[in-house]
Image: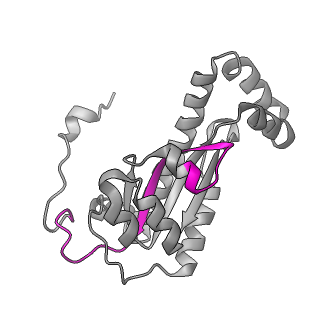
């Protein structure tokens, strides 16, 4: 299948088949793809937690607002978190990145407020989210990106202190009855000429 066909076929899954599991090889491939995600100056201010443990998924489902059934019925929930400890991040890049990248951070990012720095971290995580959703589409794995979760409670359940949950993605395989799949509810997008400009 071509990439455009994969993107045409992907959609936000509303109902999962809880009996259909993702092959472990595909899960490992998704981990490798996230590991290779791009970020500004290769900063990588993130952590991705793959949750397939039934008990942990149950706990997460209880703090996932309207996404409870998706968390429970999907095969795996991937939690996207950004680093929350700026000192830890700065130590990390000093040790791992070339001088040019560190100098860029010190000149353009570090002078900003903590809130602005963390917002810059957030943007990097969303780059990885786009890569991940595209990879799922290409691998014919269904996915549901979910900002509708309680980040602080997710952090407590996952025992995170230096990282903060931004969003989660449920992955698995759709239920045949899912009303939101393109065969039942065609995709709706604004006219291409209203969002794409060619000069």
User: For this view, does 55 lie left or right of residue 2?
Assistant: right
Residue visible at 58% across and 70% down in the picture: 29
User: For this view, does 199 lie left or right of residue 131?
Assistant: left
Q: Position of residue 125 (x, y in %)?
A: 55, 44
Please, is residue 113 above or below residue 176 in the view?
above
Please, is residue 149 above or below residue 144 in the view?
above
Q: Position of residue 135 (x, y in %)?
A: 47, 62
Residue visible at 20% across and 62% down in the picture: 180
Q: Position of residue 129 (x, y in %)?
A: 48, 50
165 magenta-colored: yes
Residue range highlighted in magenta? 155-181
Residue visible at 60% across and 72% down in the picture: 28
136 magenta-colored: no
Residue 174, quarter of picture? bottom left
The C terminus, quarter of image: top left
Residue 118, quarter of picture? top right
Q: Position of residue 38 (x, y in %)?
A: 60, 46
Q: Nearer the viewer, residue 33 or 69?
A: 69
Residue visible at 84% across and 35% down in the picture: 94
User: For this view, does 64 lie left or right of residue 81?
Assistant: left
Q: Nearer the viewer, residue 37 or 193?
A: 37
Please give the count of numbered marks on the rendered protein: 0
The N terminus, quarter of image: bottom left
């Amino acid at each position: 299948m071509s990439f455009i066909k994969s993107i045409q076929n992907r959609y936000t899954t509303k109902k999962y088949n809880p009996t259909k599991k993702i092959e472990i090889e595909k899960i490992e491939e998704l981990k490798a793809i996230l590991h290779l995600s791009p970020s500004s100056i290769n900063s990588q201010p993130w952590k991705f937690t793959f949750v397939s443990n039934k008990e942990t998924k149950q706990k997460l489902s209880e703090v996932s607002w309207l996404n409870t059934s998706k968390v429970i019925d999907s095969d795996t929930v991937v939690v996207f978190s950004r680093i929350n400890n700026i000192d830890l991040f700065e130590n990390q890049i000093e040790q791992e990145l070339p001088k040019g990248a560190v100098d860029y951070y010190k000149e353009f990012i570090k002078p900003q407020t903590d809130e602005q720095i963390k917002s810059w971290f957030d943007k990097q995580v969303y780059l990885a989210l786009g890569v991940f959703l595209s990879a799922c589409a290409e691998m014919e794995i269904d996915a549901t990106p979910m900002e509708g979760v309680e980040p602080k409670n997710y952090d407590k359940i996952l025992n995170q202190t230096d990282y903060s949950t931004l969003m989660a993605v449920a992955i698995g395989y759709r239920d045949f009855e899912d009303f939101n799949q393109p065969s039942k509810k065609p995709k709706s997008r604004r006219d291409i000429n209203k969002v794409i400009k060619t000069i």
